[in-house]
Image (cartoon, rainbow, N blue to C red):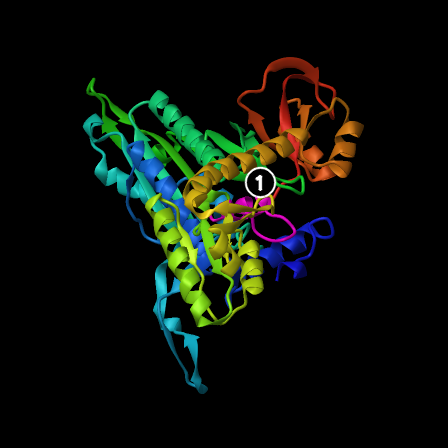
Amino acid sequence: MSKKLTKRSEDYSKWYNELVVKADLAENSAVRGCMVIKPYGFAIWEKMQAQLDKMFKDTGHQNAYFPLFVPKHLFEAEEKNAEGFAKECAVVTHYRLKTDPNDKSKLIVDPEAKLEEELVVRPTSEAIIWNTYKNWIQSYRDLPIKINQWANVVRWEMRTRLFLRTSEFLWQEGHTAHATKQEALEETELMNNIYAEFAEKFMAMPVIKGSKTESERFAGAVETYCIEAMMQDGKALQAGTSHFLGQNFAKAFDVKFTSKEGKLENVWATSWGVSTRLMGALIMTHSDDNGLVLPPNLAPTQVVIVPIYKGEEQLEEISKVANKLADDLKEAGISVKYDDRDTQKPGWKFAQYELQGVPVRLAIGPKDLEKGSVELARRDTLTKEFVNQTEVVEKVKHLMVEMQDTLFEKAFNFRNEHITEVDSFDEFKKVLKEKGGFVSAHWDGTAETENKIKGLTKATIRCIPFNSKKESGSCVLTGKPSEQRVLFAKAY
């Protein structure tokens, strides 16, 4: 199975597409630009969702659900937001079909069923949510409101790629309302930190926290904070964003509250989100030419046990040991699958679980029964060893932590090796062409220069890192004064 994968060094894009399909994560659907997330892929997303949901609730957020459709007049209320998403919107204009009078086997749009006002299929939910918040907020006693929604959104895409860019995708979107600017800014930073913690502790994916330039901000935001990750092909991937919306949406939707001092004021807002794009990030951060590599914290199945036998009698003896091991591992909080199917040979199973990135594989055959051992294979290093059956649980518990740490360290080192400081535009272009990764360079702070660099190299400013030290320098393109370096990269 995995032997048929294109090597990353030959064609990284083809390798990625093949891996998503062959590992049974997702596939293209009958709807152009949309995907079917298959059970195994969805199981990984559910692990992500469950952990993030816990982190949100631990910081005082609640889940709710808002409509998929947004009346056009609400959508256009915040002008920058409407303008930013206008070209990506799917729009509902009619509410009924009817039989085609010229062909009874076909349906046509009923011209009599035109909506009085078009409905935008949500590309994001600020408009419908802030129109709702207007009814929820009267006084400072109603604040803060800290709501999260797990939902799907539609942003019409011409060029799509499974998980990374599809016309419809799954995500969460947080929308909060606050009495003060400071409180909203603290919320924006908090959620960006939560995304970074999730990426590093659960995805084993190192990220750089920073802010976006004005041209890269969310439409309608005053500030956009982000986490940026580096993929194995040297391209950056925006893994999460958190937006300080100021009072823009409150003013657009006339959301006011009476303060403690009795004054009528507009509320302060944030929004923040991550999507199934994280699945693409997870795949491209760790996987290899043999298939998927999953960090144990997000693997739906952390350990698989495969029996090697001839005849029912051997299987019965092996199953006694395997089932006991499975029960002991489950009791230790480890997810286990015992694959005793007789429809596939052990070699096929080994290849399947390697392709699907199961962290640990245990194999038990007749000789292992005699020796009281099992063969343990690690997916991350592809190494094997024999372990005494009485030591398996402790060994696996230790490995879950070790593998998580090892994957992070490997990705962290790769990322750091691919941050290159340059001081001239010739160096800038050379690094992008020959090495890739983040290019740390001075920028004069103008959108004009930012756009010119993008036009010349296809590299964008991924973020202005929060930990970037202030240092005087000259813009890599114009030579004008600059106070700090920013990170450029080609990106997904």
Closest to the observer, 359 or 217: 359
Q: Is residue 474 visible?
A: yes
Closest to the observer, 264 or 48: 48
Side of 450 where 108 appears, left or right? left
Horizontal and vertical percent position of residue 217: 52, 34
Position of 122 relative to 138 (above/below): below
Q: In the image, which residues are magenta?
A: 274-294
Q: Residue furthest front?
A: 370
Residue drawn where x is 37% and y is 35% of the image: 249
Horizontal and vertical percent position of residue 260: 20, 20
Position of 112 relative to 150 (above/below): below
Horizontal and vertical percent position of residue 391: 44, 42
**Which quadrant: the N terminus?**
bottom right
Q: Secondary structure at mark 1?
A: strand
**Magenta residue check for 415:** no
Provide the residue designation for mark 1: 237
